[in-house]
Structures are given as C-alpha cells and as structure tokens.
C-alpha cells in the first residue's frame, strides 16, 4: 500500500505541530507522523516560559529569533482558538530574574543595559522592590531584573492546539505512527517507510527532537544531537505563592493559571534515562526552598521529566539539508522549543513555499553530510 | 482552643467558594471549612455549561436568575484572573438544543418564542442548517434551537479560582476541615465544632450540598434535600468533533478548550453510591452515539460521577434561616451550581451586609423548622 | 424506609472490615457502612508492616496482642483467598531495626533480651553482619536488631480482601454510605440514620477511626481521639535495594512484592490537613538517604498521606461501651491497625456472640461517658 | 565510547525479560536494552491467562509448547520470589470455556476428547452445572468446558519479576535505551548502536515484538510481523462476580487477585493506533453483558490497550537467524507471550549455551533472508 501527500512531517512535538499548522494555513497538504501521542515528550514536560530575554541573554542570533517569535503569541493565541477551540493558557505577568549574589547583580545590570538598547523592557529592582512585588521571596536575595514581557503559556496545550488547528485546516495527524526509515532515491529523499508500508511525498521534514538522529542515520546521515534530561515538580497552594515567574540560573518557578506552581528543572546531559530520580528531586527542591522558604508548606502534586534536544553549538538546526533534496530539518531547540515554535513553523513554511523568509536562518544551518565509520562498516551506501 | 471570625462558610464547592469570594471582596473576614479538598464533589464533576436558556426553559424564577447570573461571567472572569492568576476557561460558542422528534420541534419552537419575548436570542435551525454548523451531527435529527449565549466554563477551574481569589483577598480557606456539629445557644447559631475545637462567628453559612442535611440535623433541623447521581465520560479526537455544546433531554456533549469532549450525564436520584457503573456508561454512550455517530472512533479518556443536590420543589434554598438567627443556607442548586454561583454568592453577600439584594429571593426561601420524630426520640431539644 | 439487620458496622477500614469478616464467618448478619470507599483512608496509606516486635518494644499489653495477632496471618491469608479470591501480599522476610547511635545499640540489646525471654526471635547483628544481609545500608550504621518474624502484607489488599470475603459470606458492604447520627432510645443505641432513612439493629459497632468521635458526639458521648498525619513516598529500582524492612525511629523502608520501596512516615499530630507537604517530603527523604545512600538513584513513583487515629493513652479502644447498651467500639489503633486487625476482629466477634474472648481486653476498655460543656450547652440530654 | 557484554537482548517485554532471567541463572552476562520502561507494551496489557488448553485447541505445535510452558509456572513463581522478592500473582482456579450455541457444544466436545487423549483434564459441564459453579453466568448459555488447569498470573508482575530477578543475578537492565541500528560486519551481527555509542557482544537477541521489524530492517532483513490491537476494560465489585476465568471466542473475563475483573479483548489487526476507542469499548461490553448480565452494576475502573505481535503463519519466531551469525530472534508470540515466556526463555538460553534444547523448535524457525525492493532502492547492501 502506497500513499502520497505534499509534505510529511516526522514528529508531533511543538515544532512539528507548529510546522503542520503553518503549512496547513497556506493550503499545503500535510501528513504529520508521531510515534507516540501528540505532545508526549519534551513538549508536555516544558514549563511554557516565553523567556526570550531571560534565556538568551548572551546569544545574539537566538535573542533576535526569540524576541520575534515571542511577539507572535498574542495573534497566535486567537488564531489557534478560532481554528481548534483550544486555549493555550497565555499568562502575561512577566518574569523576575532573581539575583542571589553580588556577581549576579553586576551581570544582570550589564545585560539589562544591552537589552534596553535592543528596545526591550528590563528594569532593575532592589531586593526591597522585588519583595514588594513578590512577598514570599527570601529576604536575602540581591534584587531582581524585571522582564515584564517574558510571559508564559501551557506547553502541552500549545502543542495540542497547533495539532488540532492543523487538523481542522486539513492536515492529517497520525499518532502511534512510527517511521521506520527514510527512503532515498539517488540524492533525493522521497518518502518514509512505516509499519503499514511506504508513504511518498515532495518534502520530508524531520522534527523529531533527539530521535531525529536515529531516523537520519537510516540514510547514512549523522546529525550531532544529544539529550539533556530535565526533572520537574508541581506543587500548589490555595493562595498563590507568586504571581510572576521567578527565574535563576539553577531553578525557575512558574505559577500556572490552573493554580499549580511548576518548579524546574535539573540539567543532566547525555542520558536517555527519563526516570525522575530521588537525587534530582532533592537537588531541585533545595534551591526552590532557598528562593521561596514558605514553599515548605505547599502541597506536593507530582513530578515528571523530559529530554531536551541539544546541539554541540547550542543552536537549533532549521532549514533544508544542504545535500539531500527533499529533506528539511527542524530540531535541537534545547529548552526553547515552546518559545521558538511560532517563528520556526512560519519560516519552515516559507521554505516549503519558496518565498522570502520571515527571519534569517544563517546561524541555524543544517550541517553538511558526515560519514561515520560505523555506517560504512555496516555497508550502507548511497 | 477557640477561634473567632466574622463568617464561617461550610462547604468548598462552587457555591461556598463564590460566597467566600464575594464576602472577601467586601472586606468581610471569612473562614471557609471544607471537609475534603476544594471542588472535590459535584463542582469538579460538572460539565460547566452556562445553559441559562437550555436548562430553565420552563421555570420562571430560575430562568430569570440564570440569565442574570450568566451575564456576570465576563466581568467575573477578569476579576478572578486579576486576584488569583487563574483562568476559568470561558468559551463563548453557544449551544444547540437538538430535536430528535417532531414533538421536540414543536416544543422548542414554542419555547424559543417565549425566550425571544424575554429578550434572549433563540434561533431555530433546520436539520440542514444544524448540520452546516456541526457537520458530525446525525443526519436524521429534526433540527436544533441555537442558543448562542449559552456558553461554558471549566467547572473545577471556576471553583478553584473563587477560592484562590478569596484567599488572596484575605479569606481563610481550610481544606480537610470537617465540621462535626453546629453550636446553638438558645435560638441562635453561634459557631461550629471541629476536631480541633470550637470556632465561633457572627454568621454560619451552610453551603454543603447534600451534606448540609446531616450537619443541620445536629441542631434538630431537617432540610429536605436528596442526591441525584450523574455519571460522565470524556473522550477526545485530534480534530474537534463539534464546536458548540450539543444538548438534548438525555445527553449533552460539551467540547472543552483542552480538546476533550465531555459527555453527560445520567440521572439517578436518591443514591449516594458514586460508583461509575457499567450500565450507566452503556446507556450514556448509546445516546451519544446516536447524536454523533462518528464518536465511535474517538479516544476514550476517563469516566467520573458526581452527586447533585436536589430539593423537592426543584428550587435551591438561598438565604437566612427563618427561625435560627446566625444561620444562612445556600444549597440545593441541583445541576446548576456553576451557572448560578455568581449571583448566589453576590446575593448572599448582600444579605450578610444587610443591603438591598441584587435579585429577588422569594422563590428560594429556606423552609421553616421541621421536627422529625426521630430527633425527638433521640432527645435533642432546643 | 426502615431496614433491620443484626449488626451494623460503621467504617470500612481494616478494623471494620475484619470485624465484618469474622462476624460473617460465624453466621451473623452484618451491614457495613462506609462513607467513602473501602480502604480509602489510613488502611490504604499504611505500609503494611506486621512489626509486632519492632513497634511494641516497650508496651506490655500491645506487645502481647500484637504477637497473638501476627500469628494469625498465615491461616488468615489462606482463608481470605478461599473466600474472596484475593491475595493480601504476605511477605515473610523479617525486619532490621537499624541502630544509628551507641544509645540505640544499648537500648536494642536490652529490648532483644526481653523479647527473647518472651520466646521471640531477636538477633543482634553487628554493622558488618547487617551489611552482609543488606548491602546498600550506609556503612556507618551501628548494627541492627534482626526480627525475623516481623513480616509485612499489602495494607489495602488486606482490607479489600476482608470486605470481599465478608460479602461472599453474606455481609452487606455499602460504600458511599455515610451515617448521619446514631439513634438512642433511653440508654440503648438502636440503629443509625442515613441519608436514605433509619437502619435498625441489635448492635452498632463504631470502627471509624478518628471520625468515630464526631459520630459518637451525636449521642452526647465524647471519645478522646486525635489524628496523627503520616506522609509517605514510594520509589522503585529495577534491582531491589533491600529485601528486608529497614526500621528506625524516624523512618522505615518496606520493600513490597510489586517491586516498590515504601518510605514512611512523618508524624504530625493534631491535624486533619492531609496534604502531602514539600517540607514533609524533604524531611523524610533526608533520613532515608542517610540510611540507604544509593536511594538517590532510585526512580520517584508517588507520595501520599494518611491520618492515624491516636488516643491519649496510646492504646486502642476495643469492646462494649460501659453505659450505652447496643454500642461497641473498635478505634484508635494508631499505626497498628493492619497488624492488630485479625485479633481485634476476632475478639469483637467473640463479644457479639457472648462467648469467651480470645484475648484479654482489660487494657483497651472503652471509657465511661464524658459530658462536654458544649454538648450540654446545645441541649443534648439522655 | 564502546562497551562489550556476552549477550545483548533488545526488548524489555515478557519474552526479553524471561530470556535475561534464564541466561543470568546460567551465569551468562546479559545487557537488556528497552526503549521505554520494562513491561510498558503488550506485557502489561495482557490479562495473564495461562490458557494452554483454551487458546491452542487447534494448533498442534503451540498446544505442546503451551502445556510444557504452563507446567513451569509453579517452580518459576518460587524462584522469581526468591531472587527478586516479587510475586507474580499465580491464581489456580481454572477456566470455563463457555458455549453460547449448539455449534460451540459440538465443537468443544470434540476438542475436549482430543485434550483428554493428550492427558489433559477437560470436563464438559451442562448449563446447570456451569451455573452451579459460577452463579452469575447468563442462564441461556449452552454449557461449558471446564479446564481446571488453565490458570492465570498478573502479566506486568511476571515481567517485572523476570527483570528484577535477572538484575539480582547480575544482568544489566537498561530502560529508556533505544537501539538505533544493528551492527553488521560481513555476515555477522556484532552489536548495536545506541544514542550513547556502540555496544558490542557475542550474540544479539531481538525480542522487541512488532518493533523487531524496523530494527531488523537496519541490516536489510525483513521479518514478516504485524500488530493486532486489543482493547481491555477493568471493573470491580465488592463481592466477586466470578471465581474462574470465563472464556469465549469474542470475550474473556478474568477475575484477578486484587479484586478487579478484566474484560478483554478486541482484535484489530494491522493498526498501530493504540487509542482505546468508544466503538471498541461498546463492542466488548456488549458481549460481556450477555455472558454476565449483572455486570451492569459493576464499578467501572479503567480501560487500556496493547499491540500483540502476530506472524503470517500464526506461529512465533524462536531461534537463530538462519544466515546472519550472532543474531537470534524471539518474537511474534501474539497473545500468548505470558504463557509461553518460561519455555521460550529457557530454550533461548539452551541455544546460547549450545546445549540440547528443552523443546522442539521446528515449527518456530526464523525465516531466511528476504530482500525487499525498497531496501535495494535505498541502497542498503551486504
């Protein structure tokens, strides 16, 4: 049984679903193939921060992309609601980047200055001012950088809304649909093989996070990617502990619109072991307790983890494969997939349409072919 | 250990939490006592329809209250968000009261005429028109009454938001706090007894659904109330099956903003047996399948049930006890607690403040004292 | 509607269900009334240790009862299986009471001597010997008392099996059936009032843990009982960390037959607040980590809590009420309800039958009537 | 990073875990790689019937294997308990193959005769006799074949116990460890590639259910396998509805030792769509209700599904690959993996050791190399 479609997207996370949504809006026929359920990996584990300023304080290309992507959320919220009936939980309360040392204070001051030069709001608050905004903060913090436009959404809701809106616009969303291998004819990728047979298309888009690597290897291409595990905790109180996201280098606390407070996240590179560990929980809660001492009285709700896809340069791969025609990649967004999903989806759709790109892709180029010794050994050849 | 407060509210469902919120907004010191968790009974089982027109098609006093209460939701949504940071999931897509017989058609036409005379929108759709709006409806329906202002919210979110906003405004919200008995001194209710001792107050407000009955019996007062069990199912599809609530006499289907479709509800009076039964599930799905045949392909998510508090007259009790000073009651809202909660909370707060009421309470009077033989037998006296 | 039965048992925890099972075995017609689900409170929160020797090291009456009750488990396991088809998860691996100080060593040596004089096995292990048995123990422990007969069962399974066997033997088990008040005629308790009406019987047995107090107060009787909250954690590893229960004064670790390791329990008296708190989790894990350092790598599964019913003397109430005919009580087993349930159920059945008791009840007498001022104030009289 | 070990097993279902356990018992160093969690697919979805006689009524080779494997369970139960501390829930109550037509009666009589000739117990019961054993059976059944030795275990418990015992015996059990491709050097399989690098070994054993297919295709080998989805439901009653497994062609009901009654299973071939569907639930409950009418009053607990691995001949593949040295396969056990796991694991260990096999493998041979056109097209070659 063979089936054909314009574009096949592999991966039902936030990036794949955003691409499906943007392509469907432009009338392009899409089939999205997800091996598990939509939003079942990192896209449902994420805290949903749109921390364009807090996260990318030192990275020029990502800072620009992140700000441009963040600006798309208000219109996106309305459009996804119109097509899917779903809400993505946009909360516009901003973020406090809390300083816990004198070094932090100096560093944040400098960064705030740069951000203001870029036209962004970044206001320094003394410890007293920070406590006036969030009274449960530990009294020994050194102040905070108030980033009033670093908002948040509900990560799984956003992903499901992309998928549902895409489906309403004509996309096929297939869950429990694992791609076994890519099909290559000469220098061109022409489709995928599934358990139920061959699916052919004009373009295959790989948006499968770290699982992109194994899939691309079926055509002998070795994409450098590695997992970074993150563990999280949710607690709740009847009276909200905080109203704004509290953000430090080691821990963030995100108050959600359902009354839960999300605490994230550990950073364990190079492991696929998704178990939430006792050690991870203890480390995370230790930091959270120092930032918000009264969290000791909060109600424990649940824990979970996710695997973020990281690249050696710390920059995602977005765009056409430089050698294999018919193959596009959008992967490696590390812990910024939620924030970067609108612009990534839009630019990928620009590429498929062959029109002018909404943003510059220079920094995010897909690397050229790498041949691994092992591949040759097992006899795979072009 | 004795503790005092202005007002004690017994019951952390949607009615008790709304009263706590309205009183707290007016600066009155409230303690809300809930024996389990906030929103753990009917308030979390409800589908969240604001079906003022669909539900109260034949009841004059409830119809007026329901419309007035429904109109409060937009402002309420914003105010709860401002105080608690929580969203209540207001979806404004309206409701189709689907006719499945010629009798339905005649009946709905007459009702629509009456509703239009009351200034409400109520538009008759032919089967063809109904199918144009909701393409998955069974092709043999007889048309539908389109009630474009019968919206919906997320029932547990509303209840939690009331509680959280009340707490932010100064109320004490105590979960796992079961009242053992009311305290009566002469003709006055002066407080409650808890496991941790006596709590005194100026006013005790009973908003404990069917559990109000047992509590009021501790002072020899027998309030006629009985439970009506309702069982529900949630399913989901990647592409929404419907966008508007589908409503018939035996079954409603409510598409939620998280992508789930709620199917409710069975009606089993005079039982406290909350188990979801095999028979209930089969009966409910049978009707749902006739309305939306393609629901057979939907993904099964979960089932649950709740106990609605009903009264012999079918009207809730709202207001002061006619004989016992210091005692107020708000109970018996049957399956309309979500919809009626804003106005009930507001009018109860009017009563506590002793100001002019926002709505007429004549139809909802708390009945005068009834003496049960058994009470006398066990020796309880005033 | 009135209904009659020989015996009404109020409470579907492990004590009430054991009584129902023992009475049903003797052909007595029982109706058990449980306000929630069977085993929904402390009986499902318990770790299921049969720690007759570890727990009652200093209490003569409980030590004797506990040993006699513990000895009943092998035959009980088989009989419950025969009647219900259910397994109670008896694991016979014993328990290590681990010493973490020199004081512990001296204390345990003395206690071991006393236990051996009672004919029980109690073997002192040096640190090296303890580590030979359980290699993951911290290397700085001071040794352990090996109690090879302190086994364990699965607490909710035991409770459900009692209920199911009782039902198979003819008992009525009614869940979601809350007793509103006891009926008293003169000096006799004659039945209970439920939402659905009056239920009459020859004997009412109260086995409702801390909720016994409020129920008994409906006839003016004030039974001293208070809750002691306990929080617990379950983790798991693919390779078992330990094979025997590890027990200290502050923390126990119980390896279950489903591969989970239960870690319990905090001790917070005088609160009904069942929330699992961040602070409780951190305290508990801190101790567990010192006992089994490699637990840091274990997978976090879940947390929960329960309320243990404690009495001022630390001894349960078991037997007839000294003044009110027709009323029996079995409550206040603190954290030993699982272990004491076979003998408690059996002796209560002896009392109902009026035959010689299987064990001495002198230490566990139900106290005589106490009059609280508040009760008089509200006018309740005999 | 390269790692070496004697044997790598791919797949942490009941077959892979049984092989790991049997190899570890024989002192062979094993690494088991599971891409998700142990027992996360069909092995946890199974009802756990050991229906050697009921299932294989018409298949000579499977009937013999099934009986031989079934006979291993008592000793296995004890050995797994000794090594892991885990219980597998063996319940020895037999099975009723219920006839619902005259044709069934004739067919079962003939089969019973054949089974008795094989030395098995197979007793025909009239409708009246069947109802005497299981009083809740529908009164219009045509009788039943009583297979008193077709017992049951708890499927996920068995799988976890194999894994835990293997770990205790020295095996490495690695969850969240997905194999990306097999390594082939000439005509030999020499290891696997993981996200964390190359793992080398003497033998690779593929026990990955339907996912075996994609993995084997990475070396150009196309193993015919397809998924057959099964949906299931669990309900419960306080008093057991049945004590023995009730088995028909379309539906079975298995009373578990935890008090739940499992109802299975739909049969939907050639789909990976694991969603439990509304239609599947309705179909299954319809049959169950005809067999046990009083099931309508049972409490609904939950639903789930699994994918059974089926082969074109309906026989599993067990043994060495006929051409590729170093490669063994044990896959395609359809819905009999639980029952066949002891013997499969034991025989696979025999093969690894090179000793005489405990059972004849002729019927279960792994097919010789098949070349798919697509493989050639994508350029994979030896």
Image: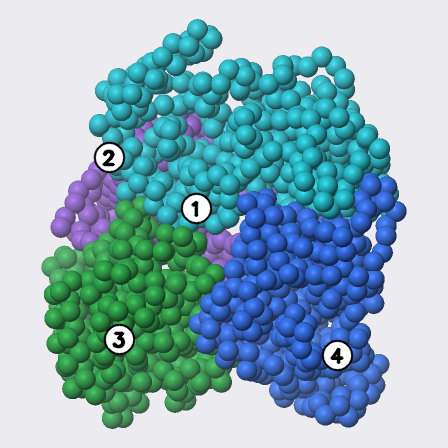
Chain colours: A green, B blue, C cyan, D purple
- Residue B11: percent from left, percent from top: 63, 59
- Residue B245: percent from left, percent from top: 63, 77
As measured in the structure, the alpha-carbon distance from the residue carrying label 4 to the one carrying label 1 is 48 Å
- Residue C93: percent from left, percent from top: 41, 23
Residue A296 makes an appearance in the image? yes
Q: Which label sits on residue D29?
A: 2
Instruction: Say if labels 3 and 4 share a chain.
Output: no
As measured in the structure, the alpha-carbon distance from the residue carrying label 1 to the one carrying label 3 is 35 Å
Q: Give the class, few, some or many, for how many residues have Cα within 10 Å of label 1's Cα (few <14, many ≥20).
A: many
Q: Which label sits on residue A146?
A: 3
The chain identifier of the residue carrying mark 2 reads D
> Which quadrant of the view contains residue D360?
top left
Q: Which label sits on residue B360?
A: 4
Secondary element under disc 3, as helix, strand or loop, is: strand
Task: Give whichever of A337, A49 is nearer the camera.
Answer: A49
As measured in the structure, the alpha-carbon distance from the residue carrying label 3 to the one carrying label 2 is 56 Å
Question: Is residue C184 positioned above or below A250 on the image?
Answer: above
Labelled pair 4, 1 in contact (Cβ < 8 Å): no
The label nearer to you, 2 versus 4, is 4
Task: Give whichever of C188, C254 is nearer the camera.
Answer: C188
The label nearer to you, 3 versus 4, is 4
């Amino acid at each position: 049984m063979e089936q054909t479609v314009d574009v096949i997207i592999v991966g039902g996370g936030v990036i794949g679903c955003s691409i499906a949504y943007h392509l469907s809006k432009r009338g392009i026929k899409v089939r999205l193939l997800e091996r598990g359920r939509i939003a079942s990996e990192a896209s449902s584990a994420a805290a949903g921060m749109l921390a364009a300023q807090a996260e990318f304080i030192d990275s020029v290309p990502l800072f620009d992309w992140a700000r441009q992507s963040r600006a798309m959320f208000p219109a996106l919220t309305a459009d996804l609601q119109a097509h899917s009936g779903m809400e993505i939980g946009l909360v516009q309360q901003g973020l406090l980047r809390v300083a816990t040392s004198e070094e932090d204070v100096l560093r944040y001051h400098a960064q705030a200055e740069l951000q203001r030069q870029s036209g962004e709001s970044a206001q320094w608050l003394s410890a007293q001012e920070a406590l006036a905004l969030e009274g449960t903060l530990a009294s020994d913090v050194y102040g905070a950088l108030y980033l009033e436009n670093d908002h948040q959404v509900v990560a799984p809701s956003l992903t499901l809304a992309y998928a549902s809106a895409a489906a309403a616009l004509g996309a096929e969303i297939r869950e429990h649909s694992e791609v076994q291998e890519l099909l290559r004819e000469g220098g061109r990728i022409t489709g995928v093989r599934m358990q139920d047979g061959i699916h052919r298309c004009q373009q295959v888009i790989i948006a499968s996070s770290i699982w992109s690597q194994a899939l691309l290897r079926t055509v002998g291409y070795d994409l450098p990617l590695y997992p970074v595990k993150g563990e999280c905790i949710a607690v709740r109180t009847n009276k909200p502990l905080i109203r704004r996201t509290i953000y430090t280098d080691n821990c963030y606390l995100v108050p959600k619109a359902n009354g839960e407070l999300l605490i994230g996240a550990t950073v364990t590179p190079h492991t696929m072991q998704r178990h939430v560990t006792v050690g991870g929980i203890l480390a995370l809660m230790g930091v959270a307790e120092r930032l918000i001492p009264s969290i000791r009285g909060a109600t424990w709700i649940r824990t979970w983890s996710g695997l973020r896809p990281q690249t050696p340069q710390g920059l995602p791969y977005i765009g056409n494969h430089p050698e294999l025609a018919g193959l596009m990649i959008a992967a490696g967004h590390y812990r910024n997939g939620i924030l970067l999903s609108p612009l990534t989806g839009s630019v990928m759709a620009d590429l498929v349409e062959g029109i002018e790109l909404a943003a510059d892709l220079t920094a995010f180029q897909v690397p050229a072919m790498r041949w691994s010794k092992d591949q040759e050994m097992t006899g795979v050849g072009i």
